[in-house]
């Protein structure tokens, strides 16, 4: 059985690779990366193949002989629209004869209203229409997305009280690696932690820093203006603002047990996970 992972130089891939190597022989793992030099530096003992989401032909070559693919979604804002990049991966996988794809999608993608879900909805449809076997790994939010709040100070938020199924990125990635190895995986996994709010987050931070820390509710537009006034990079402002829009839309409030069930153990508790991240 030959396993492959796209985007092999990223953090999500690293956690998935580490998990896979606990049970999969190194010879059976293929890493697909645009920056092959970096991938080889990170993983000198693993097979690295060049594959660029912008280049379908490179992906066909990279995926030849692969039985199971962990397809990590690309980041928006590239030279090529993300949906076209994803189409390239799926078309290439079909041409290369890959039987199964596990795709990192968006929480409850079929119901989500946020614009951030649109590319994932379209990718899911392409996978369904492709005729390939697949699993959708519908990830809720990474707790790491909130790391800027873990400084010991009050923090802005524009959630309107909506809850989020935060969990650590590594646990989502470990779940993906587990699904990849299942003989009969489900078509859809809703991966998340238990639902928490920014008020819950502030209570945890109050205990960690031994002083009262409060979330400061604002509108999404006010949130964006505050980041702009602080002089943050435009890309950071865009991602952070979109994150708040997703939360206020309620797209992340519905949680499930799929992730701990796949992992075979409970997730890192919310307070402990925040403590880990606030220490960095």
Image (cartoon, grey):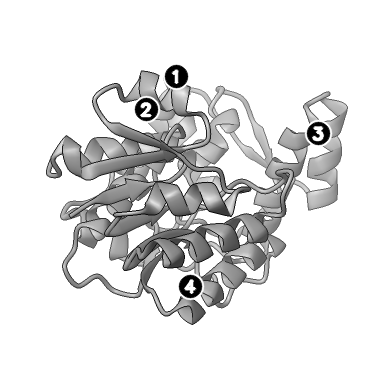
Left or right position of 1 against 17 = left
Residue with the mark numbered 2? 276
Closer to the observer: label 3 or label 4? 4
Find the distance from the CA under tag 2 to the CA under tag 4.
Answer: 36 Å
**Image location of residue 98, percent across then percent down:** 35, 63
Residue with the mark numbered 4? 127
Ranked by sequence position, the earlier of labels 1 and 3 is 3
Residue 280, numbered label:
1
135 over 24 or under it: above or below: below
**Image location of residue 204, percent across then percent down:** 44, 36
**Quadrant of the drawing holding the C terminus:** top left
| Label 2 SS | helix
* Observer able to see residue 205: yes
Residue at the image point whose x is 84% and y is 44% from the top:
222
Ranked by sequence position, the earlier of labels 3 and 2 is 3
Callouts 2 and 1 close, C-beta under 8 Å? yes
Report crowding for label 1: few under 14, some 14 to 19, many 20 or more residues within 10 A (C-alpha): few
Residue with the mark numbered 3? 234
Closer to the observer: label 1 or label 3? 3
Residue at the image point whose x is 65% and y is 49% from the top:
243
Q: Nearer the viewer, residue 100 or 75?
A: 100
Report crowding for label 4: few under 14, some 14 to 19, many 20 or more residues within 10 A (C-alpha): many
């Amino acid at each position: 059985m030959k396993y492959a992972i796209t985007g092999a130089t990223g953090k999500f891939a690293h956690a998935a690779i580490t998990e896979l190597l606990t049970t999969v022989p190194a010879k059976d793992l293929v890493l697909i990366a645009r920056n092959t030099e970096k991938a080889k530096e990170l993983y000198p003992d693993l097979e690295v193949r060049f594959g660029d989401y912008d280049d379908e032909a490179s992906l066909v070559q990279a995926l030849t002989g692969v039985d199971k693919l962990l397809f990590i979604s690309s980041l928006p804002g590239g030279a090529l629209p993300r949906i076209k990049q994803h189409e390239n991966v799926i078309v290439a996988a079909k041409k290369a004869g890959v039987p199964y794809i596990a795709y990192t999608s968006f929480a409850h993608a079929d119901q989500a209203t946020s614009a951030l879900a649109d590319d994932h909805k379209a990718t899911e449809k392409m996978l369904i229409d492709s005729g390939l076997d697949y699993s959708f790994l519908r990830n809720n939010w990474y707790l790491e997305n909130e790391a800027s709040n873990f400084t010991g100070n009050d923090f802005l938020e524009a959630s309107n009280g909506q809850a989020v199924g935060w969990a650590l990125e590594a646990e989502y990635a470990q779940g993906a690696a587990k699904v990849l190895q299942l003989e009969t995986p489900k078509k859809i996994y809703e991966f998340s932690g238990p639902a928490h709010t920014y008020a819950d987050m502030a209570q945890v931070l109050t205990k960690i820093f031994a002083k009262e820390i409060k979330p400061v509710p604002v509108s999404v537009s006010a949130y964006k203006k505050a980041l702009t006034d602080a002089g943050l990079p435009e890309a950071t402002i865009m991602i952070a603002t979109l994150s708040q829009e997703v939360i206020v839309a309620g797209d992340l409030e519905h949680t499930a047990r799929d992730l701990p069930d796949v992992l075979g153990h409970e997730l890192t508790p919310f307070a402990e996970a925040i403590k880990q991240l606030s220490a960095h």
